[in-house]
Amino acid sequence: MEEIEHYRNLVRQILTDHADATIETIQPQQIFDTTHDHYQLNYVGWQGKRRVFGPILHLNIQNGKVWIQYNRTEDSIAERLVELGVPRSDIVIGFHSPFKRQFSGYAVE
């Protein structure tokens, strides 16, 4: 359980770091569901006449592993997790098909 809490803290840190880089008319919204272990960063606002709304990052923790469900940043969130001490065997690239995951260098499930 201690490891899961550590992963929760790392995921929240990553989302918070990305939420700091915003445009003044677009607000970051961090969603931390610690009961179900889902963590998301959304952007909401306006860029000129264009509405901005949608997820930037979505990670969850399931079966003791960090799942990267969505990444619309330029950063490799998986590599950031490795830099922070998460073993590759505890990271799943959830937006890749199970077949493709076997070639990623990270966990399949």
Image (cartoon, rainbow, N blue to C red):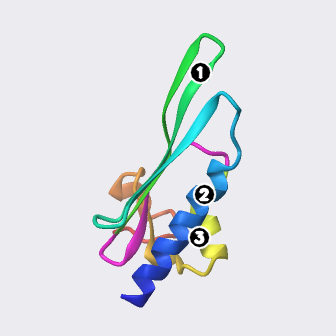
Answer above or below: position of 10 versus 17.
below
Question: Comparing marks 2 and 3, which lies closer to the viewer?
Answer: 2
Secondary element at tag 2: helix
Q: In the image, 11: left or right of 60?
A: right
Judging by the rendered image, the residue that carries numbered circle 2 is 16
Circles 1 and 2: CB atoms closer than 8 Å: no
Image location (x, y in percent) of residue 14: 60, 62
Q: Which label number is shown at residue 81?
A: 3
Answer above or below: position of 53 versus 41.
above
Q: Which label number is shown at residue 46?
A: 1
Q: In the image, 40: left or right of 72?
A: left
Image location (x, y in percent) of residue 3: 44, 86
Mark 1 surroundings within 10 Å by alpha-carbon count, few (fewer than 14), some (14 through 19), many (20 or more): some
The answer for how far apart the CA atoms under marks 2 and 3 are is: 14 Å
Q: In the image, 29: left or right of 49?
A: left
Amino acid under disc 3: Leu
Residue 65 visible (yes or no)? yes
Q: Which residue is pictured at 51% across the width and 63% down the height?
A: 104
Q: Quadrant of the N terminus?
A: bottom left
Amino acid under disc 1: Trp
